[in-house]
Image: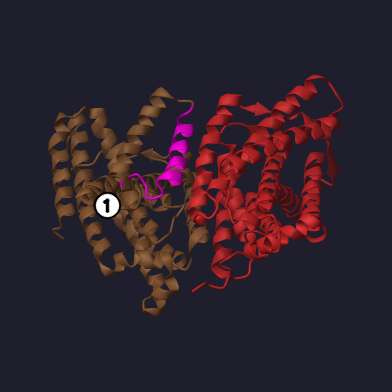
Amino acid sequence: MWSRQNIAGALAFAALAVAAPFLPSWLVSLATIAFANGLVVLGLVILWRAGLVPFGQALFYAAGAYTVALMSRYTGLRDVFVLVAAGALAAGLVAFLIGLLLARYRDIFFAMLSLAMSMILYGVLVKTETLGSTDGFHVETGTFLGYAPRGAALGLALFWLVLGTCGFAALLIATYFVSIAGVLAAPVRDNEIRVEFLGLSVDRLIHLKVVISGVLAGLGGALAALAVAHVDPNMAYWTTSGGFVFVTILAGAGSVAAAFVGSFVFELARSIAIDFFPGTWQIILGGALLLTILFLPEGLGSLAGRLRRVPEKAS
Amino acid sequence: MLTAFAILTDGLVYAAYLFLVAVGLTLIFGVMKILNVTHGSFYAFGAYGAATAVGIYFERGLPAAGGFLFMILVAMAIGLVLGVILERGILRFVYGKDEVVIVLVTYATFLMLEDVIALIWGRQSYAAWQPMVAAGSVEIGDLVLSNYDIVLVALAAGVAMGGYWALKYTRYGRLLTAVIFDRETAAAFGVNVTVVYTVTFIIGAMLGALGGAVMAPKISVTLGIGVEVIVLAFAVVVTGGLGSIEGALTGALIVGLCRAAAVHLVPQIELFVIYAVMALVLVFRPYGLFTQAQPRKI
């Protein structure tokens, strides 16, 4: 729990939290969304370590976001902590139910079935008038245990909320990665029949991973809904899932930090690219993904590892 | 009765469209084990190419029947060029990587081609209604059927039968079957797998462009049409079983009829019935209707 990486990570989060009031507001709001999405990427990293790539993770993202939006609309609840917890819980429940089915599949079929599930939700959202149809709807501003900030203070409070959630989740997942269930991801990817011969149920291991990643995606969606103050069916569309997978591959599955750094770099690059190259930013994104797969199959996160390893060899 | 008949005809037309879109995807998967997201771009390029071709052709006031052929030829030529560029330029460097990683490679090229389309054709939408109007329609009882739709169904049936015949009775088809069955053994017997891969990918790309071309007169050709069609084609081939023409045909018929039934009876569920059918099939037949379960390797 108190390993060097975890303490370094905690210090990094604390430094960000302290620095936030002095940063320009566009950067804070960009980082808020980026870190909220980083939670989804972290969930994908968990599955990617076991060799699984879901193309429908947006399902849980949208489930979390819509739970927050609906609760703030139809109940009097405004407290962000309650709303975010409810979003994560709802997404976790959906993940548990779908996981019962999904855990039996691997490779392409895992990816496709999860895609189908998310497209079912998309279809329901688009066609249901009470859920806002294609336009989606507005999410009411939340309160923080009675504190109700407005304007710039709201942006900061949301950023701290997202940062705190991410720090907490990062710590838990880092612990999960070194636990037995977490370490078994690599053997499952390499040869799952051997894992079964050890007396372990691979389906149950994967079911657990689906639920954890679903909860993380729900958290991310809930926070994103609060940060953007709007939800719409595109949150469940397959291109949203594709974007998350994209960041996961770019960041690599090396560490927990890679998910958040990768997500931040992606959001930053995307907003810059849209500003300066509006007609060709998808070419840039696609090119970056291609080059990553061809030359850095472990993701950008592996670069840090390479730099660290070089002096060791020299000494 | 009228509703039942309408569901049947609408379902058939929609199934024909789905089959034309999905057959290239399933061919590439069957032979190369690549789930090709770029197929959506082939479709979009085919549709744009056809719209441009129709515009040029009908402006000159030439006979309408030729316009139909010209549109298809242009689209397939575009598919050919794209197929060669992608297979030789990118995909051959990633053969042997994880199946899922190759999906991501095709996703990357799909993103890039989306922008290429916007760069070539701009952001406005195109209409290519002339062949549809020129074809006219027939009345059967109270139901009006467009002749164009009838041609579409005939074309789909032709492609299905042609594909089946080519696989079973031509030299290249037999080689293909050998590669589908076991790539390494086929290579050991002297089949040039590299050439088979290239040719298969090009044919798949041309079929994707053909799907886009024949749909162009029925839709508004605009940015993002590839995005929608790719998940639809996935659903069809996964329902039927990836990698078999019979599977794509059955998947297209099931999905087409279910969607037509939904449109006529419960329009609210139109969008998600397709994926619900796919999920339902996968629950009982994990690898689709026409695929045999693979033995697991220890």
Q: Main secondary structure of the magenta part?
A: helix
Q: Which chain is brown?
A: A
Q: Describe residue A235's horizontal placement relative to residue B186 as left or right.
A: left
Note whether residue A218 is visible. no
User: Residue B140's spot in the image, x, y percent?
Assistant: 85, 46
Towards the viewer: A62 or A78: A62
Locate residue A182: give its quadrant: bottom left
Residue at the spot x=83%, y=35% of the render?
B136
Residue at the spot x=34%, y=44% of the render?
A300
Q: Secondary structure at mark 1?
A: helix
User: Residue B214's spot in the image, x, y percent?
Assistant: 73, 39
Q: Which chain is red?
A: B
Q: Is residue B134 magenta?
A: no
Q: Describe residue A238's horizontal placement relative to residue A36 as left or right.
A: right
Note whether residue B11 is visible. yes
Placement of A134 over or under A181, stated as above or below: above
Q: Is residue A295 magenta?
A: yes
Residue at the spot x=48%, y=64% of the render?
A106
Please, which residue is most extreme toward the front here?
A314
User: Residue B206's spot in the image, x, y percent?
Assistant: 70, 42
Colouring method of the image:
by chain
- Mark 1 packing: few (<14 Cα in 10 Å), some, or many (20+)? many
Locate residue A206: give its quadrant: bottom left
Q: Tell me which chain the residue with mark 1 is part of.
A: A
Towards the viewer: B167 or A117: B167
Q: Which residue is mark 1?
A: A256
Residue at the spot x=74%, y=54% of the render?
B8
Count all numbered tags in the image, as a single digit: 1
Q: Describe residue B35's horizontal placement relative to residue A265 as left or right.
A: right
Residue range of the region highlighted in magenta in the rendering = A280-301
- Amino acid carrying label 1: it is Val
